[in-house]
Image: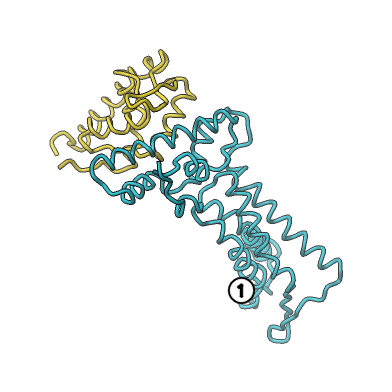
Chain colours: A yellow, B cyan
Amino acid sequence: MTKRIPSRIARGSAELAILALLAEEPLYGFEIAKQIEAKSQGALRFNLASLYPMLYELEKRGWVRGRWEANRAGRDRRYYCLTSAGKRKLVPLRREWRFFFQALDRLAGVARA
Amino acid sequence: MRDWVALVREGLGNLDLSPAQQEETVAELAGHLEDVYIELRAKGHSESEAVDRALNEVSDWGKLAGEIRGARREEGNMNSRTRSFWLPGLVSLTGSMGLLMVLQRLNLQPYVSWYRAEVALTFYLPWLIAQPVFGAIGAYLSGRSGSSRSIRLAAGLFPAIAMLGLFCVTLLAGVFVERNAFIWHHLAYLALTTGVWVVTPGIGLLLGTLPFLKTPKALLSQPMVEN
């Protein structure tokens, strides 16, 4: 069973996680939370309280855009998609995290732990 | 099924956004809770268990409201800390100090207790009795702006906190600037004065603040609504 990542670390990675998911397809909040949990194999979990302030912040920065649409069950949900500014942001963000993990690995041997 | 929209609306309070943005936020968050509930029910959880676990998505509605307000509001408005702490705290402080000044203007005689027959400790009983009202005002105004529990508490206790700050400044000025020997020889008196002007009103303020530290009623006891 995968251990869950502590919330203080998860919060820092939320920006990347959300932008990376939305780069694949538009999703609404609940779907974003479910996909983050599923794709991280349960290591990352965002609840309502941790997810939406981040989504709204990303929207204010102009990296994502929300739009009301009906989901498969016919209920109106606010779907988020990546804007072109968000796509441009995702590239350096991925690079920063890769650099961060490499630095952490050199420092603490994270990959061999 | 629960009325998730009403529940979220009460939990978030006034977000100080445009009416359209407020309603949109409420609808979106209610939809999320509804999805959590539906998923849990589909997995075989009981109604009450599904509701409880959906409600666990948010542990502090005040904090969430503050974060959403900060994230959604356009720049340039009064910042969240001013609205949720400084303003309510200053209203509470002004009310409390204003009443004290009025009582003194009216020449109301305080109850006096003597410390070693040297120093008088004065208690303005009507002022002390009124403190819960000012604590309640501070906490209420803070809560209305969607603050977290700890900010509501701090706003309610603000007059006592300000008084403590004033005491500390006076004490430091007495010791280091005026080189006042009286302070060193009467430390017990200082402690008693702090008790009279900080701790006692602080307890009164706390009593008024407590009812506003509770989670909104709807989140605890909203009746089930049949679909």
**Picture coordinates of residue B126, whole percent (x, y):** 74, 71
- Quadrant where the image shows the C terminus of chain A: top left
Quadrant in the rendering for residue B210: bottom right
Q: Residue furthest top?
A: A84
Query: B136 or B159: nearer the eye?
Result: B136
Work out whether B54 lies above or below B171: above
Work out whether B184 lies above or below A14: below
Q: Residue furthest bottom?
A: B117
Q: Is residue A108 left or right of B37 when viewed as pictured? A: left
Task: Identify which residue is drawn at 57% across, 49% down.
Answer: B143
Q: Amino acid at mark 1?
A: Ala
Task: Identify which residue is drawn at 65% across, 77% down.
Answer: B189
Q: Is residue B145 left or right of B222 when viewed as pictured? A: right
Quadrant in the rendering for residue B103: bottom right
Residue identifier under label 1: B191
Query: B128 or B177: nearer the eye?
Result: B128
**Picture coordinates of residue A26, whole percent (x, y):** 35, 20
Query: B115 or B65: nearer the eye?
Result: B65
Work out whether A66 lies above or below B33: above
Q: Residue furthest front?
A: B226
**Picture coordinates of residue A112, whole percent (x, y):** 13, 36
